Amino acid sequence: NFMLTQPHSVSESPGRTITISCTRSSGSIASNYVQWYQRRPGSSPTTVIHEHNQRPLGVPDRFSGSLDTSSNSAFLTISGLRTEDEADYYCQSYDSSHVVFGGGTKLTVL
Amino acid sequence: QAQLVQSGAEVRKPGASVKVSCKASGYTFIDYYVHWVRQAPGQGLEWMGIINPSDGTTQYAQQFQGRVSMTSDTPTNTVHMELSSLTSGDTAIYYCTKELREHRFDPWGQGTLVTVSS
C-alpha cells in the first residue's frame, strides 16, 4: 500500500494564490489518476479536479491540477482566492486493489 | 441526475453491528461500482471498500476485512454496508459514493453518522 501526504493546513488572503501538495510514498504519481475533492463543513465531498488536471463542469477555472514526477507529487492550485473556497481539500488515487486518500488540507481564507 | 440517498443516523453500543443503506436514482444502477468511505471526527477520509452492484462482488480495505460486508439489492437500487464488532473508533460519518470512471467518485451520498457509545 502507498500513502498520500498533504500539508495539514494552509492559509492565505482573498485574491491570492495557494498550492496544495500531495506526495505519493511509493509507485509513480503519474501511474494512476489523482482526484481532488473539496469538503465544506456539513457537506459531502465534491470533485474539483479529476484525472490529474481535468475540471468538472461548473468548477471555476481558478482551480487547476498538475503533477511533478521529480517529487512524485500532485498539486492543487487555487488562484484569486475567495472566502467560499475555505474548506478541506483531499487528494485521492488508487492502485490495483486499493483506493487511497490523503489526510486532507484545511484551507483558511482570511 | 444521479443521486445517492443514505439511511439515517444510528447509535450502537460497543460490540454491536450497524447496517447503513444507500439508495441510488437517476442512473442505471448496475452500470457503476459503489464505494464506501468514512470520516471519523477530526480525521480524514478513509476508504472502506467497493461493490459491483451487478453481481455483488466486493473488495474490502485490509483494515476492515472480516468485519465489513457490502451487499446490493438490484430490485430496489440499494446497496448496504454492515460493520460488526463496533468500537468507539468506528464513530464516524459513513458515505457511499458512485465511481464515475477511473476511480473518480461522483456523486456522494449525504452521509450517515454512526455513533458507538456505551
Image (spheres, coloured by chain):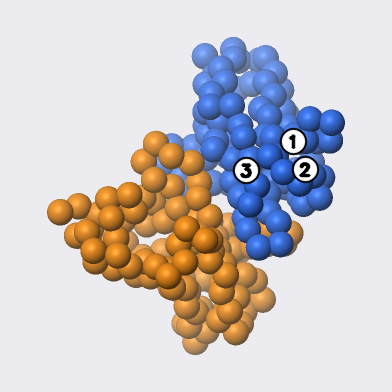
- Number of on-image labels: 3
Taking the view exactly as shown, the residue that stands out farthest to the left is B118
Q: Which residue is mark 1?
A: A74
Q: Nearer the viewer, mark 1 or mark 3?
A: 3
Q: Secondary structure at mark 2?
A: loop
A86 vs A27, left or right, is left
Q: CA distance from mark 1 to mark 2?
A: 7 Å
Chain B image colour: orange
Q: Residue at x 37, y 57 (%)?
A: B112
Q: Do the residues indicated by labels 1 and 3 lie within the same chain of the protein?
A: yes
Q: CA distance from mark 3 to mark 2?
A: 11 Å
Chain A image colour: blue
Q: Amino acid at mark 3?
A: Met
Q: Secondary structure at mark 1?
A: strand
Question: Is A70 or B30 nearer to us in this picture?
Answer: A70
A102 vs A28, left or right, is left
Mark 3, chain letter? A
For marks 1 and 3, the one nearer the N-term is 3
Q: Residue at x 53, y 61 (%)?
A: B61
Spot occupied by residue A106 in the image (x, y as percentages of width and height): 52, 28
Q: Residues within 10 Å of mark 1 (few under 14, many from 20)?
A: many
User: In the picture shown, does residue B96 fall above or below A11?
Assistant: below
Q: Are the residues at dot 1 and dot 3 in contact (C-beta closer than 8 Å)?
A: no
Res. B20 in view:
no
Q: Are the residues at dot 1 and dot 2 in contact (C-beta closer than 8 Å)?
A: yes
Mark 2, chain letter? A
Q: Which label sits on residue A3?
A: 3
